[in-house]
Image: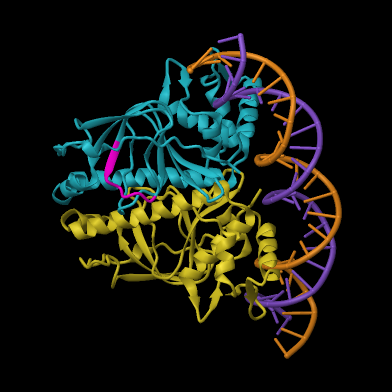
Chain colours: A cyan, B yellow, C purple, D orange
Amino acid sequence: MFVRITTDSAPRPNSLRDLGMTSDSNPLVGLSEFSYKKGVEVYGEKEPAEYVYQVKSGAVRSYKLLSDGRRQIGAFHLATDIFGLENGSEHRFTAEAIVDTTVRLVKRKSLELVAESDAMVARNLLSMTTSNLQHAEDHMLLLGRKTSLERVAAFLLEMDKRLTAAGVMALPMSRRDIADYLGLTLETVSRALSRLHELGVLGFIGNTQRQIVLLDRHQLASLDLTS
Amino acid sequence: MFVRITTDSAPRPNSLRDLGMTSDSNPLVGLSEFSYKKGVEVYGEKEPAEYVYQVKSGAVRSYKLLSDGRRQIGAFHLATDIFGLENGSEHRFTAEAIVDTTVRLVKRKSLELVAESDAMVARNLLSMTTSNLQHAEDHMLLLGRKTSLERVAAFLLEMDKRLTAAGVMALPMSRRDIADYLGLTLETVSRALSRLHELGVLGFIGNTQRQIVLLDRHQLASLDLTS
DNA sequence: CGGGGGCTTGAGGCCACTCAACGATAGTGG
DNA sequence: CCACTATCGTTGAGTGGCCTCAAGCCCCCG
């Protein structure tokens, strides 16, 4: 159904010297940085999970593929988000830069080592995993039971919380990405956005279609039935 | 769309005396037990998470509801499964006994207390949370991108792993439960099962339709596209 | 300036949903 | 033990929401 073209020429962060670890409450502050160009893979599903990442700037998508190319994006990672945190030794998603992206990273091993002795860090790991779980649980409800309009409304509200600046939401991801996140096709996403535009719920800015102004958050929220 | 009738007359396990905690690797061994009749609620969404549960016998469904009654079941909990483990203070699902069910339980607080000092218990908490996360991630792919036949095939394979005895799978849950787990309607589930029966992939036993024999696991697996 | 990718919009089709009827089963009370 | 009833499951007919296929526009970028 969907065919992915992946430009995989990403230099691996192998050459990085070992990192010092802070035992701060924020376990990823002040570490090595690395940049990925738009479309480049950060890591692949089933690859050994060597690093944990935090988005410094840009955006990343995490997805799974079926053998025939159907894709499900599990999450978008935006500035300050931590991703690639696995408990087992393998990544369960493929992660790709959506736009040019810079990340901070730590070796997973050293993080585990610190968590061993520092209960604070251990609690943070658990709480991050729980946040991911909660997001996945909410997303199951969306994917299993919501209509296309409800899904798009929910998506806009989620993004609004995370990246609205000066009333304008600048979406880094394409319609196809949104569709694969919401379990729809890009045409259906486009139609839903047009419909919301007609309804006066949102407006577009500039000549690109990725800058969105939410005009009526209340109406938008009422379109997305909450649990 | 779906209207839930919930018989909520469950006696709450408030009267239970405080429990001793073992610091075993299995944190729920040897504790108090409690029984719930078929259809009875164990806890509700957004209720304070006072206890953690382990299924001793029977089966439990965890679900979320939309305001109009649409239901998404996030997981089925069978014998030996632990559920109700929240990191935050509130339950994120409603849990109901599918059939008459007996559970073991511990106070969440005492579990946290032990985890504080015992790194082993802490690691187990993280690893259980990670298992839940992994299941949710796989389920997102199913809900977002798989066809009805693929979903039912995946469901049968999952249940097969968990509760097949002597070649026969005795499903505790109804077609409606399966449907709400797979993001389908009960009719679609029934049709898919009939289709698999025609294909010779499975057989029914006895006069109830909940006893299923998988005749061709290989063919079943090929119907469920894996990632 | 030409080519390609991203987005929108329309037309038509299909898969899952809705509505409905029916049989079978299990639970209930006489 | 046997109606009686409610629940569960299957199956059919028809609908509809989302998908598929396609055309066209716009913008970006080489």
Question: Does B74 appear in magenta?
Answer: no
Residue at x 54% of width, y 74% of height: B169
Number of on-image labels = 0
Position of A132 with respect to B180 (left or right) is: left
User: Would residue A86 appear left or right of A166 to someone viewing this image?
Assistant: left
* The magenta stretch spans residue A49: yes
Taking the image as shown, residue C24 lies to the left or right of residue A161, namely right
Establish if A17 lies above or below B191: above
Residue A187 spot, x, y in % from top left:
64, 32
Q: Position of residue B93 (x, y in %)?
A: 46, 52
Left/right of residue B83 with respect to residue B151 in the rendered view: left
Is any atom of residue B106 visible in this view? yes
Q: Where is residue D28 drawn, in percent x and y?
A: 50, 16
Residue A196 sits in quarter = top right
Is B159 rendered above or below residue D29? Answer: below
Where residue A90 sits: x, y (%)? 33, 51
Q: Nearer the viewer, residue A168 or A72?
A: A72
Residue at the spot 63% in from the left edge and 70% down from the top edge = B201
Image quarter hosting the N terminus of chain A: top right
Residue sitting nearer the eye, B208 or A113 = A113
Q: Main secondary structure of the magenta part?
A: loop
The answer to which of C1 and A170 lies nearer the viewer is C1
Residue A27 visible in rendering: no
Task: Report the magenta residues as a range.
Answer: A46-53
What residue appears at the point 24 percent right and 45 percent down from the top-left corner?
Answer: A108
Reply above or below: A88 against A205: below
